[in-house]
Amino acid sequence: MLTRLLSGDTPRSLPLTLILLAILVSLALAPFLFPGTRSVDTAARICVFIVLVASYDLMLGYAGIVSFAHTMFFGMGAYGVALASIHMGRGFDALIVGTLAGGIAAAALALVIGLFSLRVRAIFFAMITLAVASAVAVLVSQLSGLTGGEDGLNYKIPRALTSAQKYMDEKLFGVRVNGKLLNYYLVFACSTLLFLLLLRIVNSPFGRVLQSIRENDFRAEAIGYRVVYYRTAATCLSAVAAALAGSLYAIWLRYVGPDTTLSFEIMVDILLMVVIGGMGTMYGAVIGATLFIVAQNYLQTLMGAAAEGLEGVPVLPLLLNPDRWLLWLGVLFVLSVYFFPTGVVGRLRGRG
Amino acid sequence: MSAPDHLPTMAQASPWQRLEPHVPLLLIPVLALLGFLLIPSTSSWLTLTVSGLAMGMMIFIMASGMTLVFGLMDVINFGHGAFISVGAFVGVTVLLGLSGLTGAPSLWLNLLAVILAITAAALATGLLGLAFEKVIVQPVYGYHLKQILVTMGGLIIVEQLILVIWGPDEIFLTRPEALKGAVTFAGAAIEKYRLVAVGFGLLLFLVMRWMLRSTRIGLIVRAGVENGEMVEALGYRLRLVFIGVFVAGSALAGLGGVMWGLYQEVITAHMGANLMVMIFIVVIIGGLGSVEGCFIGALLVGLMQNYVAFLEPKLALISNIGLMVAILMWRPQGMMPVVKAK
Amino acid sequence: MSEPAPQKAPILRIEGACTNIAQYHILQGVDLEVPAGAVTMLLGRNGVGKTTTLRTIMGLWRAHRGRITFDGQEITALPTPAISRAGIGFVPEDMGIFSDLTVEENMTLAAASGPLDSARLDWIFAAFPPLKTFWKKEAGTLSGGQKQMLAIARAMAEERKLYLIDEPTKGLAPAIIATMAGALRDLKAQGASILLVEQNFGVARMLGDTCAVMDDGRTVWTGAMADLADDTSLQERLMGLSMETA
């Protein structure tokens, strides 16, 4: 039963299983285990990013295509919810319409970009997605009438999902049972579902064709698979999943802006999460996203402390300045690609 | 019995067949003409055209190395933008240090300062390129996916190091005295610096073209872009040639970075990464590996950007994507695709 | 009876070479000697590893087992440029013409150690007149036969100790095959050592001194070309068809 739920793709390593279980339990019980707005926020962010990173891994790790437009698709889902909520008024119908519209738009754009660039050369795809995504980011910040520009958009979501709505008078295990809690579980449940769906996709016959294309596209083409179509289909599926993750994030945050959804920094974060977790292993997304977001929250504090401690020493405090944490992630990233391309999951499975 | 002594071509080439190879080059005047028809005032059109050409020349300088590096070794360097930023910071630091020369009202002293700055930038980025090639690129030859990831990581590291060395703030600068202001020509105000940029870019293009066409190294590079294996089988160490091209391309990117900094009068650590978007478009529409295609592509992008920014500012960046889409629909491999043996 | 094969010291010796391409074992133990100053034919059906053998000698693909010695020096692991500079001229199966470069530029590059020797060039022009006619033309505009001439001329641009030539007559018209065979005979007359892959039996018989037959990634027969040419049943057995009927 459990194996079927995981589409037969079990973690295949005891430590990995334990870590994944720990993450699952922590996220499932996050509001109770780590009460406080900031920790629950972090947990929700982890849920969303697990889906986002897993969907990216479908492209990078399974189909072997590098895209720099994943945040764009993420943003389409988020802006879809935001715009629908603003123009249709607060309500579940707006959330649904926005999510659907974002997903469809992302699929359509992914289809166009995919057919256009993958037809020629797979590396065109990386360059074209970078160009298109940055143009879209600029456009979003320029069209402030529609998108709120750099400031982004604030909007209302159904009251049932906000802390204003109370479901129980008493606290449950010291936690208020309100709309916010429901909202968290909405995010958690949808993320889990989407993750299982992605796991199903990569373990389907379709997923296996993708992997054989990644290994040797000439041979796959020779056997009779239309490589372009498979790659484009992977791109579209991945884009839709990213858009859905974006919608969830928008519902959780009640705000969208270029910095939270479209920025290149987030794209870099996604890349880091995939590589650190392990490319081509869906579970890598879980570990990568969790590790990275937790580190993001606490590493900077740590670096700040270290920089203060080293005051007076030349250069080092500058290198350890909390604002420079991307430097260390960059180094980590390059080293991971060289030395353990299969990431944490690969290491735990003992074939690093 | 002897072999036929004629070229296997049709006796009569149709006018279109004769014209076709020149179509990419002709697109430049066509675009300029289109701009002329759409832009109401002739003087604005002239100003925009010059600034479009200046921008195109600078982009060409920055992009040329990247396209050759790809053509020669099939290496795609997403970290190319790092050299642009580093070049700009080194060059501007030198310029700021030479305020005695840049502040003097003498064209020659000013140019001397600029040349010193450019040389320093090119040297620094050339060396950085050498290190980048050895440390970052070499271990991932032949693996596009890893190349993209690793060079992207290299870009992040270099950007962050710039922030460590020069601090987190952007640096504003003023152009040397003699390059400030504008000249008026046919009622149009044309910034002097843009004219200098056009002249300098053209000069570099001609030198590069001459080197590729008339020197042995150039022959090796051109032959290597088409069939590297055969070049090696003829006894040339392509690997060394490639390192040379990589270093030269990095130096050109750094040089272009200084020029871009002087053009914008402000530099940031992210400028290189931001410019990469335009560079990719140029390299793709030119045809990966083709220096001439890159040149034409850069001028088209520069003109397009300036005309559209004048007519409908919000569409400027999108217009270049549109240009790219249009050209790829016409020629999926870019305007001047390089014949690959494999 | 034809003369026995010339017994000269080998310029090239391959011992037990095995080469893999991706996961496929293409060469599985090639043993071959190329005597100096003679033409050695490398024969066999399609896909038995003749091209791979030549590419392995050039270091374009690597033998993971076995030894290749050239002119007294082991070259098994040398980089391709060093193998070329040791004195081997190579004409690949796909000719490897630089089509963006002119005929002149192709030839200039081929003379890797210095400017083209004019006497040598005259000899090349005499063998391949079209190259003189189209000296300034882009090589990509040449016909198939002219490209093949250029490919061989490029290998001849400098004096080499050994020439590796892969199917120089493939797909050419009879008139051009004659030109090609004439040029190769010329080269042979000058005392060059040649390892030639050839499917055209007429040409093979005319030029070959010794001969090696490959099957399934191995050399299965070596001996004098004349012995093979005279023995139809041996041809049948080794290559599945006889030279007379081809």
Image (cartoon, coloured by chain):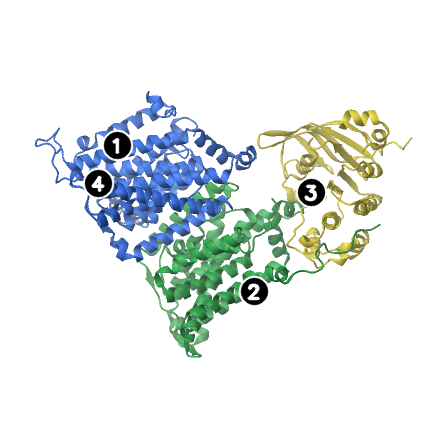
Q: How far is mark 1 from mark 3, CA to CA?
A: 61 Å
Dot 2: element: helix
- Identify the amino acid type marked 3: Pro
The colour chain B appears in is green
Q: How far is mark 2 from mark 1, CA to CA?
A: 62 Å
Dot 4: element: helix
Q: Residues within 10 Å of mark 4 (few under 14, many from 20)?
A: some
* Chain in blue (letter): A
Q: Residues within 10 Å of mark 2 (few under 14, many from 20)?
A: few
Q: Residues within 10 Å of mark 3 (few under 14, many from 20)?
A: many
Q: How far is mark 4 from mark 3, CA to CA?
A: 68 Å
The colour chain C appears in is yellow
Discs 2/1, front: 1
Which badge, 1 or 4, comes first in the chain's sequence?
4
- Seen as rendered, the residue at the extreme left is A169
Q: Residue at x 51, y 65 (%)?
A: B28
Q: Are marks 2 and 1 in contact (CB under 8 Å)?
A: no
Tag 1 residue: A189
Q: Which mark is residue C92?
A: 3
Discs 4/3, front: 4
Q: Position of residue A292 (x, y in %)?
A: 31, 38
Discs 1/4, front: 4
Taking B266 as reference, is A300 left or right?
left
Tag 2 residue: B206
